[in-house]
Every structure is written in structure tokens, then in C-alpha cells.
Amino acid sequence: MASTVMLADDDPVLLEEPADALRGAGFKVVEAADGQEALQEALSRRVDLIVMDASMPEVNGLEACHCLKAMPKTQKIPVVLTVAKRDPEARL
């Protein structure tokens, strides 16, 4: 059975390339448009890894990660938080 990776980002353009690459490598991919959707998807299906944008509107990636780690059903799912900066001069 193929592992399932969830990609969560509010920018669909940033989801496209990694989703295609993961599918090409044989993974199942679930996409979420925000942190709330990521939480719902993680609770409703088996997910082996979550890669999530830290700065999404509404429920951001960090808040979603805290929620995931607080729930027994999802607390052991590895989560990778990402940050995409469009402005090369921007600082964290």
C-alpha cells in the first residue's frame, strides 16, 4: 500500500509541482487549501506525512500542527512546516 502525504498550502501553484513529483514517485497525495481543511483531512483518512505551509490564513500551519499533536488519532503523524517567501528581501 502506498504511503499518503498531505500537502497543505493556500497557494495552489505551490502545491502543483510537489504533488506531481510525489505522485510520480508512487505516493498517494491529499491536498488541503488551509489549516482547517488539513485538520479535517487528517482526521478523516490515514495520512503518513503532512507537509504544511506555516503561514496560511484562518488556521495557520503552526496552529494546525499544535492541534494535530494534541489529538491522539493524529499526534504521531510527522509534520513538516514550510515557508515560501516571494520577496527575497523578506525576513522571518
Image (tube, rainbow, N blue to C red):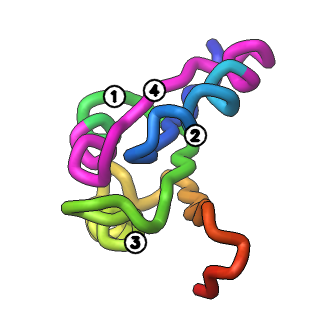
Where residue 9 appears, x then y in whole percent? 44, 46
Question: Where is residue 78, by image quadrant?
Answer: bottom right
Taking depth in this image into account, of 80 and 21 the one nearest to the observer is 21
Residue 14's disc number = 2
For the residue marked with disc 1, what is the amino acid?
Arg
- Kindly indicate whether the residue at mark 1 contacts the one at mark 4 (C-beta within 8 angstroms): yes
22 above or below 68? Answer: above
For the residue marked with disc 4, what is the amino acid?
Val
Quadrant assignment for the C terminus: bottom right
- Mark-to-mark CA distance, 2 and 4: 14 Å
Left or right of 25 in this view: 30 = left
Question: Where is residue 83, by image quadrant?
Answer: bottom right
Question: Where is residue 72, by image quadrant?
Answer: bottom left
**Dot in front, 2 or 3:** 2
For the residue marked with disc 2, what is the amino acid?
Leu
Quadrant assignment for the N terminus: top right
N-term-proximal mark, 2 vs 3: 2
The residue shown at (20%, 61%) is: 58
The residue shown at (58%, 18%) is: 28
Decide whether residue 5 is among the magenta residues: no
Question: What span is colored magenta in the figure?
Answer: 21-40
Residue that sits furthest to the right in the current view: 25
Residue on which disc 4 sits: 30
Residue 45's disc number = 1
- Kindly indicate whether the residue at mark 4 contacts the one at mark 3 (C-beta within 8 angstroms): no
62 above or below 31? Answer: below
**Pointer 4 local density, CA inside 10 Å: few below 14, some 14–19, many at least 20:** some
N-term-proximal mark, 1 vs 3: 1
Residue on which disc 3 sits: 62
Q: Could you tell me which secondary element the residue under label 4 belongs to?
A: strand
**Pointer 1 local density, CA inside 10 Å: few below 14, some 14–19, many at least 20:** few
